[in-house]
Image: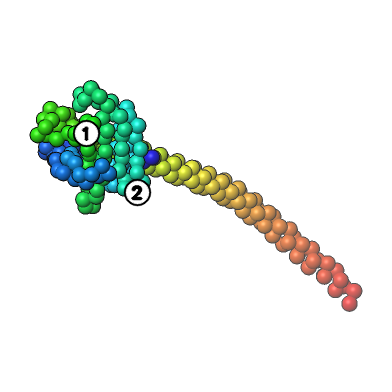
């Protein structure tokens, strides 16, 4: 499925260091209650596309991912992330539009009774920040691929239109050549017609002389 967001602005935003520092923490409600969440805002994104990209991105966590269609919450059960925990963890994610082409991703990482936060788990928190930043780059990369695909399609459409114009041009030239050949043939026919007219004029003149002689002959008997 293709999602085209504001790819250029998204890519530019990700090229700035400020986007790494853009990962914030806040206590926020989700399906399991109110817990510490990590959030990152992605410029040039839309809600549906970002959620779909997260579902694909979550495959790297090697857990079972499903989406609650009512709340839009994406839940990854028993994710395997050794750099966060020796045991499996549960990951929750929600998405909120913060303005035109701007989506904030809220994520919760449940270690099994405790949700990761920077005060209790400083090292793990840094890893979570990296995960969210990498996700933003994942979105940017996919958007760039979509843009390339769309541009390639647009180029193919233009090439097809150009080939059609070339074909029409060849047809026009063919008709011109056929018309020139017809004109040359008609000019030759006109010349032959003029010659025939001249010959027929001479015959008519001779015939008029013969008629005059015949009339003279007839007048002798009056």
Q: Residue 70 bears which disc, if any?
A: 2
Q: Is residue 132 above or below residue 94?
A: above
Q: Percent position (x, y) of residue 5?
A: 28, 45
Could you tell whether 188 is left or right of 85 in the image? Answer: right
Q: Residue at x 43, y 44 (%)?
A: 161
Q: Quadrant of residue 89?
A: top left
Q: Quadrant of the C terminus?
A: bottom right
Q: Percent position (x, y) of residue 100?
A: 23, 52
- Looking at the rendered structure, the secondary structure element under dot 2 is loop
Which badge, 1 or 2, is on the more N-terminal residue? 2
Q: Quadrant of residue 219?
A: bottom right
Q: CA distance from mark 1 to mark 2?
A: 25 Å
Q: Residue at x 19, y 41 (%)?
A: 35
Q: Residue 113 bears which disc, if any?
A: 1
Residue 172 visible somewhere in the drawing: yes
Which residue ends up furthest to the left in the rendered image?
119
């Amino acid at each position: 499925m293709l999602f085209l967001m504001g790819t250029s602005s998204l890519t530019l935003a990700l090229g700035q260091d400020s986007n790494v520092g853009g990962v914030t923490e806040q206590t926020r409600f989700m399906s399991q209650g109110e817990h510490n969440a990590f959030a990152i805002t992605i410029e040039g994104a839309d809600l549906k596309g970002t959620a779909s990209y997260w579902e694909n991105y979550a495959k790297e966590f090697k857990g079972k991912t499903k989406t609650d269609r009512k709340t839009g919450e994406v839940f990854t059960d028993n994710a395997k992330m050794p750099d966060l925990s020796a045991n499996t963890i549960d990951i929750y994610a929600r998405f909120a539009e913060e303005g035109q082409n701007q989506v904030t991703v809220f994520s919760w990482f449940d270690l099994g009774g405790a949700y990761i936060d920077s005060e209790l788990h400083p090292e793990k928190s840094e890893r979570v920040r990296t995960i969210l930043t990498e996700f933003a780059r994942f979105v940017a990369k996919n958007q760039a691929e979509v843009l390339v695909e769309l541009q390639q399609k647009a180029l193919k459409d233009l090439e097809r239109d150009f080939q059609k114009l070339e074909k029409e041009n060849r047809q026009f030239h063919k008709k011109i050549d056929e018309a020139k050949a017809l004109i040359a043939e008609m000019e030759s026919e006109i010349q032959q017609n003029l010659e025939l007219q001249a010959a027929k004029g001479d015959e008519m003149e001779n015939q008029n002389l013969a008629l005059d002689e015949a009339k003279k002959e007839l007048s002798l008997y009056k």
